[in-house]
Image (cartoon, coloured by chain):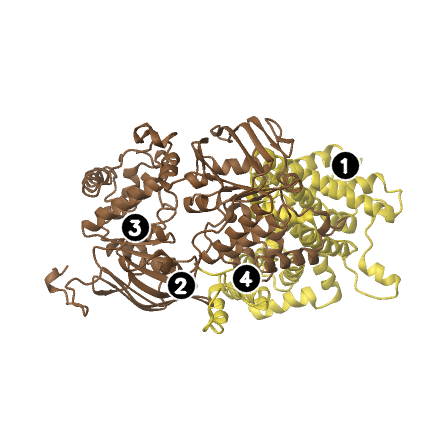
Amino acid sequence: MTGPGAQAVSAAGGAIPPAVELIGLNKHFGPVHANRDVCISVPRGTVHGIVGENGAGKSTMMAMLYGFYKADSGRIRINGEDVHITSPSDAISRGIGMVHQHFMLVEPFTVLENVILGVEQGGMIQGSLNHARKELRRLGEEYGLEVDPDARIRDLPVGLQQRVEILKALYRGAETLILDEPTGVLTPQEADHLFRILDTLRSQGKTVILITHKLREIMAVTDNVSVMRRGTMVAHRPTAETSKEELAELMVGRKVLLRVEKGEAKPGECVVSLENVSYTDDMGRERLKDINLSICTGEILGIAGVSGNGQSELLEVLSGISPISRGRIMFKGEEIAAPGKQSNPQELRRAGIAHVAEDRHRMGMIMDFTAAENTILGYHRGKEINGPVLMDLKKVEGRCMEHMEKFDVRPPIPGLAASGFSGGNQQKIVLAREMEENPDLLLVGQPTRGVDIGAIEFIHKQLITMRDAGKAVLLVSVELDEIMSLADRILVMFDGRIIGEVAAKDATEQALGLMMAGCENPAAGKQECGGDE
Amino acid sequence: MAAPKKLPVWVNAGLIPLINLMAAFAISAVVILAVGENPIEAAGHILYGAFGFGEGIGYTLYYATNFIFTGLAVAMAFHCFLFNIGGEGQAYIGGLGIGLVCLYMGNLPFWAILPLAVMGGALFGGLWALIPAYLQAKRGSHIVITTIMFNFIASSVMTFLLVDWLKKPGSQLPETRHFAEAAFMPKVHEMLASVGLDVARSPLNLSFLIALLCCLGVWIFIWRTRWGYEIRASGKNPKAAVYGGISPSKAIILSMCISGALAGLVGLNELMGVQHRVVVNFTNGYGFVGIAIALMGRNHPLGIIFASLLMGALYQGGAELAFEMPTLTSDMIWTIQGFVILFTGALEHMFRPQLERIFIKSDSEGEVYE
């Protein structure tokens, strides 16, 4: 390594070359120009945000920096030196570390074992473990990243798992850390904690590249921000000189409403009620504990909570996917679920319970099926599209075309495989399927996950329209913003229980965040919370 | 994110299989050269043997009939994402059903025996597949393991039945008495002779037509009915199927039963068409070849027909080759068949990246995906 004094003085006049510079990067995937002449310069010792809608090319750019893909053309410079990065291990050896959105951890292994995975020295593992234990202690003290080195990953909450990922990168000598959508799985408090860690890293001279679609986080933690749209860099801004509104507009290319406009709710009679409902999964764990709730016509009931606290299970028992072990569920005056009694999701759809699944990749759609085939999932036995034996594919296609026009799905090709649509358009196909059958109760999970801002606006409007048409809507989302702006009442779930209820107009992020972390009564103060840390 | 790569249909369905086949033949040629024979001459014998004269064509199609049945069976299960390795056993037990109909209802006229035999074969084959299907659906026993084991069980059961129960009285051979003539499947050359057309004698019989009808039926069932929809949904994404109110267990059981039923029809060709009695091991590995057929035919009935014709041609042409060039023993023919299966089935994507480069680069300029 050359000393700092030997480094060339950059044209901008600073003595320290940028930690990372990408110059004119291009990447094609077949006909898709995923990155077009992308340039970015990340000064050393800063937190640099990269925002953009899904498919804007953020991940592709980072994948090239991290050596997953090779750029078609363009240069990568690290600390002022031209480099060729051909693999992640190449990137790591040049001081680049990555914390993926989905953690790359071996769950049954301990923290220590995960940290040394892939960088063990010698034939026996004990030496590496001892070395790593010392090193972890040092890193923990230096950056405020304490984790029990002997804890098993699967026993750690996600916030700590993420910390292990960061430690892994630092242990490998990372000077520049790339974090890909790091807060998706965290409570607001955990996210704040992460931001404090990023602060410490910055103050110790590390460089952080933060990829996110949450503008709030960009504003809160970054020094500079770069905006991508359709594979190109459209703007670089010092964070202090920009605003959420400007960034949103840059991302989408037009003005965007960040708040949802809606009138007062006019709740009517109750459509569905859960009475002391519990659910135990196949592994014998009680996922729902004594749930009591009801939803009325003309209102949106929001369920807030960190993912994995029973919201998915709530949707599943309501839609007939999972059986309940105690209590009962009443829908329009009829019992639809009780211990030993489970209604089929198809019957429930016919009766008027539509369900937009939380995860369209794993549940809501079949990615290999065409859009038209996905249009009838759950309604495929309907009399309108079936003869005695044959299914009327013309009608199925017609229905799909109708949905596509009404929900502005692009491209409007019913025969295209679902995987060929962007996230937002996939979600519109699912929403159209569930909303167009005129249900009385709409269950919606994560309606805008992986959906671009333009489509989010549209989807939110549709949900409000459903409400105003006198339907009952149950909205589950991990995005607090979404819950707070759409819901009329908010329930918070923690550890399978409903831990509190607030009217949307009285809700604050702080109070909801504390409840999401397990405080029954946030007003009483933090010390009563059953926190994880 | 990598966008889905799209090749023109004719490249996907035509050029790629052709290149794969050529690669298989090229390697086979090397092997033939290595044993000191002329590969061009050998290819000529295979082609002539399979398609060069009426009898050869008849034999090719007769072999293809078996492959269509077993290939369809494997494909049917695969649409539910199940590997049915038990086609051999299901065909064997299906043959028992057909044999029983032909043995004990031989006094009926042919037009009555045929549907009964079809039902008998389908029922026995389907029920034989039902047991592993049930174990998979309700108990999670892996269908690959259970169907393999059921092949052995089928083999033992049939040997037992043929030796102890169904054997022709006074005979030493493990086979039944001959069927009544009414239970013989009409040969194609006989049928054509009756309308005045003269074609060469061969074992090709009416069941080839039944096999083609099965292809049509499977195609309609899988892509044009709600049951096929449910089976495909369960195969592609069981969680999404449950979300849509589809029971994956029922889909597993239904698709396996149909799969077994299709395999069970091999006996129409082999027993009613050729042997005219139930003999030991009449399935002769056709059930296993069905796996390769389905693989080559991409689990599509049309692809299965082509794959079956190819394999039928290799069987028949290979026999001709072994006859004409004695140094190329039947082991050598199997080697060639092995290469064909390897390249067109297991290594089907080997040349894909190169072709994608050729065909996608040429029209990629300046286009940005939405």
Answer whether labels 4 and 1 touch (C-beta < 8 Å).
no
**Chain letter, disc 4 residue:** A
Of residue B314 and residue B12, the one placed in the foreground of this image is B12
Q: Which chain wears yellow?
A: B
Colour brown maps to chain: A
Dot 4 crowding, Cα within 10 Å, few <14, some 14–19, many 20+: some
> Can residue A476 be seen here?
yes
What's the mark number on residue A220? 3
Badge 4 element: loop
Q: Is residue B310 above or below residue A265?
A: below
In percent of the image, x 53 and y 38: which residue is there? A315
Q: Residue at x 66, y 56 (%)?
A: A399
Name the quadrant of the N terminus of chain B. Answer: bottom left
Could you tell which of marks 2 and 3 lies nearer the N-terminus?
Answer: 3
B62 lies above or below A169: below
Which residue is labeled 4 in the image?
A410
Using the rendered view, name the quadrant where residue A397 is placed. bottom right
Residue at point 60% right, 70% down?
B41
State the CA–CA distance, disc 4 to disc 1.
Answer: 67 Å
State yes or no: discs 2 and 1 in contact (Cβ < 8 Å).
no
Do the numbered discs 1 and 3 sit on residues whose CB atoms are within 8 Å?
A: no
Query: Are the residues under marks 3 and 4 on the same chain?
Result: yes
